[in-house]
Structures are given as structure tokens and as C-alpha cells.
Image: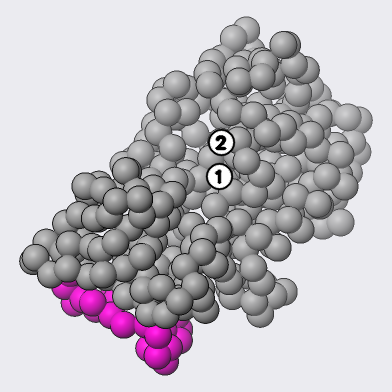
Amino acid sequence: MEGSTYDLAIIGSGPAGLTAGIYAGRYLLNTLIISRESGGTIMEAHRVCNFPTYNEIRGFDLSRKMIEQVGELGIHIKNETVEKLKENDGFFEIKTNVGTHRSKKLIIATGREKRKLGVAGEKELLGKGVSYCATCDAAFFKDKNVAVIGGSNSALTAALLVAEYAKKVYIIYRRERFFRADPAWVRITDKNEKIEYMFNSEVGSIKGGNSVEKLVLKDGLEVEVGGVFIEIGYEPNREIPKQLDLKTDKGYIVVDNMQKTNVGGVFAAGDVTNNPLKQVITACGQGAVAAMSAYEELNKENDGLKDNEKGIQGLAIQ
């Protein structure tokens, strides 16, 4: 099925993509957002405590508010899976599992995916006690012993959520202390009597029949648990940059301070870029800049897009 032609297509609907959509809507651009699932990985965050205007908010709630705002601006959101991207005769063709769309400009905001542990039993017991989403699955482990693998903010917040249901939570981390987690989260987990740290420990395999029964650490120690939450970081989506021949650094799209890539008409924003700080607030900022850059290019090419006499600054401050 052939789709419409848009001024701007945004691939990804996390904070970066949704913010780009909000700004594009205010710039009166005919905009399409394509994403396999709406909301991005922020939907899985138990608590977001560093986003201005909220002392604390669930990631799911924050994402839904952004989605609602995008909808109020009349932006099209299609839950489709991108299969192929190419530039053709001045347009970008986006083939999905449903059809093909065209756009004059493109913003890549595909974020990152959870990194796999890569041990025996992980794949086989996925959905049978192995999980990558505490927000989704924590409630299934009421009164059980559970392990959280990792030492980041994501690992600690996952442990805190799981501890609301589980009997005992082991945080298993390969280093001697938490180097990557914010001290504020460490202080909170320190005070939780259900949480026990296992430093200098690495998982060798996950054992079980119909469900997870235990972890075997690389030093031979066995830890009896009914569930395992894996929070060992993220990896960028590499397929889309490869299709468009975008310059990357360790898989992350290289952008300048206007979120431009090495390919004309293509911008990138959020966790998929080489920006070192992967946070909701920085993703939103990059999404806004990417939308502005796309608008500027379209305005120059069309010699006054939408007959808008206010220009960039006028729209940006409203």
C-alpha cells in the first residue's frame, strides 16, 4: 500500500522523536512519526526524577503526555516496522511492513535496545523468568527471590521496583562498586532491606526447566532465584544508519550541533546519536533542534514554507 508524501518523517517515538514531532507541528510541517511501538524505552522507566516540572513521574505517564501533545497538533503516528530506507529522486522512501511513505526530510530517533547478557539459558528462559523490563514484569515475582544483573541507574531502579513485590532482590554486578549509577539511587538502594549487593560477580548461565530456578556465577557459586532482570546497558540500532550510509561512532550516529548527519536532509536525535549523555532531557533538546534544522532547510528550499511570516524564532517562543 502506497502512503502519502510528507514534509518530514520521524522514525522513532521516544522523547527525541516525540519532541521533534511537537516542534514540527508548531512549524506547520506535514509530519509523519513511524515507530514499531509508541513511547520508546522511557515507557519502561519505573521512576523519572530528573525531568523539569516533575519531582517524580512514571516513564509511562511522561511518555503518554508527550504522545497526547503530539496528537493535539495533528501529527500522524503510525505503528509500523521500518524495513527499508532509501533516497530516491529528492525524497526519502520508507518501506514498512504496511506500505511505503515518502518524505522530503528525515529524522532518525530510533534510540537504543537492551543489551543481551549472552549466557546459556537466557534465550531459552525468556518469558519464563528472564526479563528485560521490570516495569512490565515485576508484579509476576511476588514473594520470590529475584536477581537484577547490572550496575547502572536502570539496574538500581529496576531493583527498587522489583523489591516492592519480591521477597529478596540480589543486584549482581561485575565490578567492586557502582561506578555508573547516580549516588542518589545508590543511597536509596542502600537503605532497602530487601536488596543485597553481590559485587565482583558475573553470571555464567541461567538454569531452569519450565521456569528460572537458579543462576550459576562464573566462580561456581549458585544463586537460587525465580526471576532474572537483565539491565546491562543498551546498544544502538545499527541497521537504519547502515542503509543510509550514515557516519557512525561505535554504532551511534555522528551529528553536528544542529543534529545534521553526513547525509543531506537526514538528521538524528536522542540516544541513537553520539551525544555522550543519554537522558530524557537531552533527547528532547536534540529532537527540538533536529526539527528546527529540518524546517530551516525546507523553508530555504521552498522559499517560505507555508507562507509563515513569523519564522523560526517566532514559532519557537510560543
- Which residue has dot 2 on it? 108
The residue type indicated by label 2 comes to Ile
- Please give left or right for residue 39 compared with residue 232 in the image: right
Mark 1: which secondary structure? loop
Q: Position of residue 305 (x, y in %)?
A: 83, 28
For image coordinates 50% across by 25% down, the residue present is 263
Which corner quadrant of the image does residue 95 belong to? top right
Callout count? 2
Which region is colored magenta?
175-201
Q: Nearer the viewer, residue 139 or 175?
A: 139
Q: Residue furthest front?
A: 210
Q: CA distance from mark 2 to mark 1?
A: 6 Å
For the residue pair 149 and 223, the one nearer the viewer reads as 223
Lateral position of residue 31 relative to residue 49, left or right: right
Residue in the picture at 52% in, 60% down: 137
Say if mark 2 contacts mark 1, CB within 8 Å: yes
194 is higher (above) or lower (below) than 111: below
Residue 79, image x, y percentages: 68, 34
- Whether residue 286 is visible to the viewer of this picture, yes or no, is no
270 with respect to 38 (left or right): left
Query: Magenta stretch: residue 199 in it?
Result: yes
**Where does residue 103 sit, x and y in percent of width and height?**
69, 21
Q: Which label was assigned to residue 269? A: 1
Residue 270 appears in view: yes
Looking at the rendering, in which quadrant would you find the C terminus? bottom right
Residue lying at the far left of the rendered structure: 219
Residue 1 belongs to magenta span: no
Comparing 19 with 61, the one in front is 61
Task: Identify residue type, mark 1.
Answer: Ala
Task: Give the residue at x 49% y 34%.
Answer: 261
